[in-house]
Amino acid sequence: MEYLIAGAIVGVFIVIVFIGIKLTNKKMDQALNEVGEDVKDYLINTPYKNVENIANAVYAPAYVHTVTPKGNGGAALYLLFYNRYFPNSLEQFNPADINISKAEYSEHPVKAGDKVYILLNQDKGAKVAWDVK
């Protein structure tokens, strides 16, 4: 009986993970359909920039697809970038959800359609690199 309950719990968890993955892929596919070929070409053909003093890190070009203002004055950014950096990963478009603070948003008022660079580091999540041009 215990095995049946444990199996049911694991099964529910697996279903929840697959639903989350499917929704993420659907959102990214929709975003890619909305951007033009010029944006896709920019993301594919713009080279990464090396980061000094941080091992296994690069600056990658990204496209701001959506900016959602948050109640605290900050914003949630949905970015698209072309991943050719992380090992064991196919070269493909990937999304990045990044939250920025109120101070960052007031200093850098990004909007949908802007092009920015993000810091990709194997050990940490992506961050917007405001000073990279």
Image (spheres, rainbow, N blue to C red):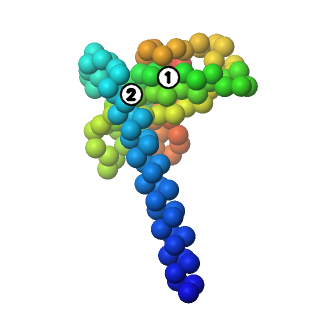
Q: Residue at x 52, y 72 (%)?
A: 8
For label 1, count other residues whose C-alpha is less than 10 Å away and answer few (under 14), some (14-19) or many (20+).
some
* Mark 2 lies on residue: 31
Q: What amino acid does circle 2 point to?
A: Ala
Q: Residue at x 63, y 22 (%)?
A: 69
Task: Assess whether mark 1 and mark 2 are in contact (beta carbons under 8 angstroms).
Answer: yes
Q: Is residue 7 above or below residue 118?
A: below
* Mark 1 lies on residue: 66
- Of the 4 image quadrants, the one containing the N terminus is bottom right
- State the SS at label 2: helix
In front of the other: 130 or 103? 103
Q: Is residue 75 above or below residue 110?
A: below
Q: What amino acid does circle 1 point to?
A: Thr
- Of the 4 image quadrants, the one containing the C terminus is top left
Between discs 2 and 1, the one toward the N terminus: 2
Q: Which mark is residue 3?
A: none
